[in-house]
Amino acid sequence: MHQTVQNLLNVNSEIKSKIYELKYNNYKPEIIAISKTFALSHIMPLIDYGHLNFGENKVQEAVEKWSEIKKKNKNLKLHMVGKLQTNKVKLALKVFDFIHSLDNLKLAKKISDEQKKNLIKPKIFIQVNIGKEVQKSGLNEDNLLDFYNECLNLDLNIVGTMCLPPIDKDSSIFFSEMKKLNSILKLNELSMGMSEDFLKAIEFYSTYLRIGSKIFGKRS
């Protein structure tokens, strides 16, 4: 068995144990295997095993890596987990099924325009800068409700919210806040939790866990 598949099974096992411990019945989060910077030789064993959700953070790299594979594997879902620039939206919509990083109106309008032209509707998460960190992208939570309504007016398919909590603080505080914000908006999906804190994210019913190094190993 390839190491990446074994790593995925280990992560799955940790998730199942945590859910059992919490007694969260009928809850099963999806794992997005964050494959950015990794070659297809690392990724193919997971695809062959049957894993469906993968994440990339650069549009050009994603198009080059995934365009052909997605034609052959119609069930694969590709997630844009990095910052999306407006000039890359047209290209992004050709390969990504989910966008996890919507955080401004200019980008929202561009996605709206392109999805009309191409008759496709990606599932979108609004990125919230939950730790109010100046170096991070994301919407201020005070502006979230207004922004969400503007997105609905643009006919965007907003499925949930996403966050990257501060790395030097307890993630639970921020995951708890995100869960509240999501319920206010009555959204079903939550994109939060990475290799170092996905078990905490499970406590707050994250539906998409973005896991890279625990599956693929450290990036060079």
Image (cartoon, rainbow, N blue to C red):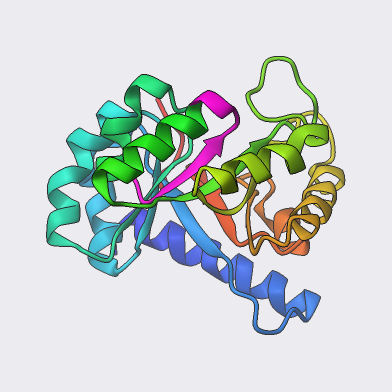
> Residue at horizontal 35%, vertical 62%?
52
The quarter of the rendered structure image containing the C terminus is top left
- As drawn, is 192 to the left or to the right of 156? right
> Residue at horizontal 58%, vertical 66%?
29
Q: Position of residue 140 (x, y in %)?
A: 76, 29
Residue 9 seen: yes
Read off the magenta span.
Answer: 96-106
Determine whether 202 is above or below 118 in the image: below
> Residue at horizontal 73%, vertical 39%?
146
Q: Quick one: which residue is furthest to the front in this view? A: 153
Q: Dividing the picture into quarters, in which one does residue 93 lie?
A: top left
Was residue 36 drawn as part of the magenta stretch in this picture?
no
Front one among 131 and 196: 131
Determine whether 107 is above or below 7 in the image: above
Front one among 207 and 91: 91
Was residue 104 drawn as part of the magenta stretch in this picture?
yes
Q: Position of residue 170 (x, y in %)?
A: 84, 40
- As drawn, is 132 to the left or to the right of 92? right
